[in-house]
Image: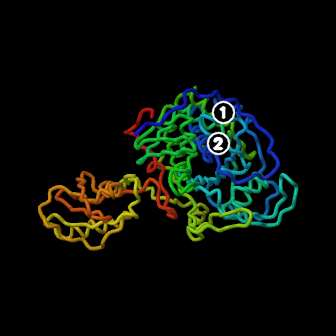
Amino acid sequence: MPTPSRPAARAPRPPARRRPVRSGRGHHRRRTGWAVRAVTALSVAVLASSGVGHAVMAGLDSGIERVDPFKDMKNRPEAGRGLNILLAGTDSRDTITEEQRRAYRLGGEPCHCTDTLMLLHLSADRSRVSVVSLPRDSYAMMPPHTDRNSGEEHRPHPVKLNAAYAEGGPELTVRTVEKMTEVKIDHYVEVDFTSFMETVDAVGGVEICTVRRLKDSYTGLDLAPGPHRLDGGQALQYVRSRHLDGTGDLSRMQRQQRFLAALAAEVTGSGVLLNPVRFGEVTRTVLGSLRADSGFTTERMLDLGKAMRGFTPASAEFTSVPVREEAREVPKIGDTLVWKPEEAKRIFGALREDRPLADHDTARPKATVVDVPPERIRVQVENGTPRQGLGTQADRALRATGFGTSGEAVDAADHATARTTVLYDPRWDRSARTVAAAFPGAELKAAPGQGGTVRVVLGADFTEVHPVRAEHPPEGTTGALRGDEVTCPRSKAAGKA
């Protein structure tokens, strides 16, 4: 398949500048790059862990634009253990050049609302960070407030979550999120748009992996299966794309989380932290784009970074608030996503109680990433060896990793099979490759006319079923993944795409 094309020339990027918020709520159009600011801000704590942090960050505090998202707030949730940061990214494109608009297809009018909202929880012992994506189209009941544009007094009313920023800025955004999650926000960070590309380029690009082709005509993204090192412009296309499958923003959130993990791995695994020049360049890029509450100073960031020394991709965990399949229509607003109450309660309860969301046992086998989710595949196990009970063992292990099975293994005609074989109808070749990933070294063999069920004949080489997981879990799943489970293996670094 073709490798992704690059624009002939990179447009020069102008220095970041601030513009006043325009009046009017705008329309909720398709947003541009709603995790790009989140990626940039997440780098601060990682970068701050370097021993040269004080020298570089001294004096940069004055360059951060300050906001007061906690002004006159009452009846807030009780504080839990650890630290909670609300990471917001607006859809502002004020500093994007016309060349960049054309090269990376950044057209459209901004709605002056949040493209992304992520809740970051740093554990009390500073050993773990939990990242929870809040879907932008979530159904939300806006608390009473004064519209920052019109001055009109609003009673509580239903909206999409990303509209809180348009009506009441950071303060109303924090109030709305706290009401929905019952998690007290300690700090608020908002990040500029254009610095994303500069940040990615400053660290030398970021490596991502994909098991299937990613092609989106809206953003221009075109990645063949395999590993790719993305520069700033390509990375922007990657985190913006939402027309790759039928899940839209839900799978895009997962890609953006994957990119956050990949950026953290790049920073901690490369020489950025040990190179004062590169460290200074990246840090100035990041801090020059931030808006934050007055208490989130560079000194505070540095202290947090020092406490997080030793952080690895496995120290981070990522999840999204699961939503129901049925959308809820709101008059004059449109369809909204409704959170699954029990699952959401479990996630935010874990944050309040400072409990992990993912399994942090790094000794367990790392699941192989596959294209087709195992939940969508039916498997029939056949025992091709004289070992009694081997088929039942494999059947149970397949079900445990997500596959649908017949529930009853059978004996194969040949009890002297040397090599495990995966037999499949060619029409279901992608499903067959997912099954084969659970049996490393197995032979793939086409069986025309077999139908949708994949047959596995166990051979003498079989020892155990290897865990697999989909690159994009099925909609509605609630599992959290560690950062090292969503990044490329460090030993298989790729060159430029």
Q: Nearer the viewer, residue 447 or 322?
A: 447
Q: Is residue 192 left or right of residue 390?
A: right
In percent of width and height, residue 405 lies at: 32, 69
Instruction: Name above or below for residue 274 compared with residue 23.
Output: above
Q: Is residue 13 left or right of residue 251?
A: right
For the N terminus, the image quarter is top left
The answer to whether residue 372 is seen in the rendering is yes
For the C terminus, the image quarter is top left
In percent of width and height, residue 146 lies at: 84, 58
In percent of width and height, residue 429 lies at: 32, 55
Q: Residues within 10 Å of mark 2 (few under 14, many from 20)?
A: some
Element carrying mark 2: helix
Q: Is residue 39 left or right of residue 97?
A: left
Instruction: Name above or below for residue 369 compared with residue 78.
Output: above
Q: Residue furthest bottom?
A: 408
Label 2 sits on what residue type?
Met
Q: Are marks 2 and 1 in contact (CB under 8 Å)?
A: yes
Element carrying mark 1: helix
In the rendered image, which residue does mark 2 sit on? Answer: 301
The mark nearer the N terminus, 2 or 1, is 1
Label 1 sits on what residue type?
Met
**Res 57 label:** 1
Q: Nearer the viewer, residue 362 or 115?
A: 115
In percent of width and height, residue 250 lies at: 55, 56
Q: CA distance from mark 2 to mark 1?
A: 10 Å
Q: Is residue 364 left or right of residue 13?
A: left
